[in-house]
Amino acid sequence: MTPTPALARLLGASTATYRLALIASPRLLATPCKLTATDGTIPSHVATLIRAIAVRDTASGLAMVLAPTGPALRVAVAARAASDFGDAAIFGAALPDAPTKAKSPDSPRLGVCSARTADATPDNPSPQQRNARSNPHSRSIPHS
């Protein structure tokens, strides 16, 4: 399956939507990641950090939605993928056990999904398309 700009924009919109929910309710991330206090409350420093990360992720998600197709969209997707992989590494090292790590919404799967959308723009042709464009004697490959 070849990723499309529509896929990048869908991923950006879902990222922004979920992260806006985290800004409103840090519990959505704190509870499954076992970042709550023993009485179930969320320490203020944890809520502050979750909200700060959520603001960054909301911005990168909106960038994926609003960036024009082409290099700007690829940069927005690359920034999102880098954030996802970074979050996955930090959560992977810091969360207490494997079941909790698996519940984390910042898993490596998101980074891979973001990275796969990086080739989502028409001006980033496949190797076959580049070869066809540079070699006038090669068979023509239609552009999508």
Image (cartoon, rainbow, N blue to C red):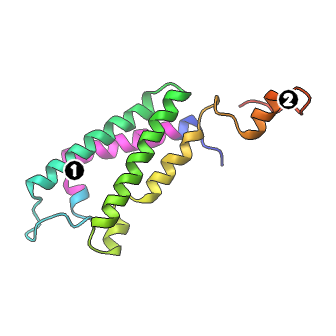
Q: Residue at x 75, y 33 (%)?
A: 130
The part of the image, by quadrant, that contains residue 71 is: top right
Q: Is residue 72 left or right of residue 39?
A: right
Q: Is residue 138 left or right of residue 9?
A: right
Disc number placed over residue 50 in the picture, else none: 1
Residue identified by numbered label 2: 135
- Mark-to-mark CA distance, 1 and 2: 51 Å
Q: Does residue 15 show up magenta in the picture?
A: yes
Picture coordinates of residue 118 (x, y %)? Answer: 55, 41
The amino acid sitting under disc 1 is Ile
Count of numbered marks:
2
Q: Is residue 90 left or right of residue 123?
A: left
Disc number placed over residue 94 in the picture, else none: none
Picture coordinates of residue 107 (x, y %)? Answer: 40, 59
Observer-nearest of 70 and 4:
70
Picture coordinates of residue 129 (x, y %)? Answer: 76, 34
Q: Which residues are magenta?
A: 8-28
The part of the image, by quadrant, that contains residue 79 is: top left
Q: Quadrant of the C terminus?
A: top right
Observer-nearest of 115 and 23:
115
Picture coordinates of residue 88 (x, y %)? Answer: 37, 58
- Outermost residue to the front: 134
Q: Residue at x 38, y 47 (%)?
A: 83
Above or below, comparing residue 46 to residue 117 in the picture: below
Q: Residue at x 37, y 59 (%)?
A: 89
